[in-house]
Amino acid sequence: MLLSFKPFTQRVRALSHCSTDVSERIDAMQSKIEVRRAGTEVCVRGAEAKRSFAVVSGWLMRTRLLADGRRQVLGFILPGDAINLSWHANAFTASDVECITDATLASIDGIKQEMTQGDFSAPLCSAIRASLAMDEMVALGSISRLARQSAYERLGLLLLELRSRLLLVHMSDGKSFHMPITQQVLSDALGLSIVHVNRTLMQLQRDGLVERRQRQLILPDPDGLAAVVDYVPPEIALPEIAHAARNAPQPVGLRLVG
Amino acid sequence: MLLSFKPFTQRVRALSHCSTDVSERIDAMQSKIEVRRAGTEVCVRGAEAKRSFAVVSGWLMRTRLLADGRRQVLGFILPGDAINLSWHANAFTASDVECITDATLASIDGIKQEMTQGDFSAPLCSAIRASLAMDEMVALGSISRLARQSAYERLGLLLLELRSRLLLVHMSDGKSFHMPITQQVLSDALGLSIVHVNRTLMQLQRDGLVERRQRQLILPDPDGLAAVVDYVPPEIALPEIAHAARNAPQPVGLRLVG
DNA sequence: CGACTAATTGATTATTGTCAAAGCAAGTGG
DNA sequence: CCACTTGCTTTGACAATAATCAATTAGTCG
């Protein structure tokens, strides 16, 4: 698979609905690249969020440590995602961010500066806002997913979310993607025991909805799985798509399953 | 209990750490008041988010409807909270918003305009950003809460979150508050069955951590409950508090329980 | 007083967690 | 190349938790 130098650019372009191409604008910015090792922390909760990054490669996660030693994974940060870019998170980080794999990060302080000091309605600014809106949809999706009562649904939904997000940056062909996380991490993200994650994964395999080869995850029938677990892709409320949905007869967000 | 005309002002002031008082600034703004009836929708997902509101009184909730008819409550919107104020959510609403009780809303389009067109670092803007940062912390808290494996913890954490938020707008005395929601709504918010919510509530009562009189909820020992369920208040990562924590020897976010 | 809706309880089933062990793969040092 | 580790996955047996079904009780509102 060809890895783009800056999936961040790809993602922003994919989510931006304005015709102006903002890619060159972003690529033209100064951007120091840094390499981080698996297991190291990029941000510590409560510390100053001095710098903003875009993930060039590797997977990271937001975590929270509980008093009893359990670790909670609040969400995954994938190539193309931004760290500390949110408008209001300009002073302090809201959670720990840890590298799951080795990762390369690009500094995007320039973009942050542009966002807070430049023209609010400029194409670049507007495109970044669309990207942040996507982040918010992902967060709402996480809440929705965790509130589901069934482990089968939760796991299926998470896999579909990862697929959606990786599709944006061309790191999935639609049926499979590289998923460099252990079942332990998966269980921390889903609020399930590791044993049950394994059993549920096996069940998904037996149902022909999931296959695994080493760290490659295959979804032979993503639409089928989406129908089974009632998946609503995070980008569905973004402007252009929402516009289409508004003109449809069915209420937005309501899906028919067969 | 004395109900302030604009809990929104109170909340922003409480969360703002700059010495300048922004209250008059907000109160001086044009603000039409509207009354909404319990059960009605304020926003529909995917529809245009033309207007921003501050909740003056009443409880609302973000919801999502599932294909199988279940309703998920993504979060509660309390007096003092803003709707559609987030910087990037400038075009379309990300979820349905429904009134739980009768509610009065104040239009705050003026503030939104100020935020997107005015000086980024102005005191008002900065105070609103602190308020939005708090919203993000609440969202992270929701993810963390739902990922917990125990119903007892989940319920305790939700009650403590509501208390924290109501304290901000002086709608709780620290030990009790008015909670106008049914156990059905509670169960939709926690991802538990209504029967189990009831049983867990009874257990909390038997443990002396919760009392209820009609719709009044009493937490006789909030700190005790917080220790039992390992509650981290959402405002803990806000600037002034984080600053203190940073200078403490213990890692931020780690709590000791007896 | 009915007619609701909400809350509570019991009995039972289903799901999920916990404990324990075994299998597997990659790496390491002799 | 082979023991030997180490970390991850898989499985089984069992216990705990939570869902479901079914009544009953309590409140509220006309």
Image: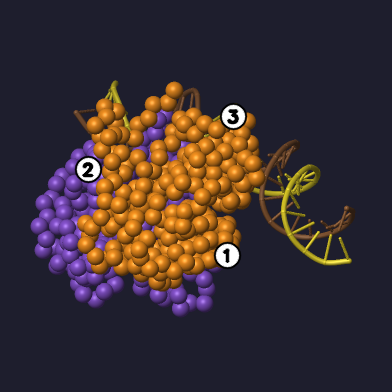
Chain colours: A orange, B purple, C yellow, D brown
Residue plotted at (19% across, 46% down):
B50
Q: Are marks 2 and 3 in contact (CB under 8 Å)?
A: no
Q: Quadrant of the N terminus of chain B?
A: bottom left
Residue type for callout 1:
Arg
Q: Quadrant of the rendered structure where residue B138 is?
A: bottom left
Q: Residues within 10 Å of mark 1 (few under 14, many from 20)?
A: some
Q: How many marks?
A: 3
Percent across and percent down for residue A39 are 58, 63
Question: Within 10 angstroms of label 2, few (less than 14), some, or many (20 or more) residues?
Answer: some
Identify residue type, mark 2. Answer: Glu
Q: Nearer the viewer, residue B168 or A218?
A: A218
Mark 2 belongs to chain: B
Foreground mark, 2 or 1, reads 1
Disc 1 target residue: A37
Q: Is residue A204 visible?
A: yes
**Spot occupied by residue B60 in the image (x, y as percentages of width and height):** 28, 46
Residue B44: which quarter of the image?
Answer: top left
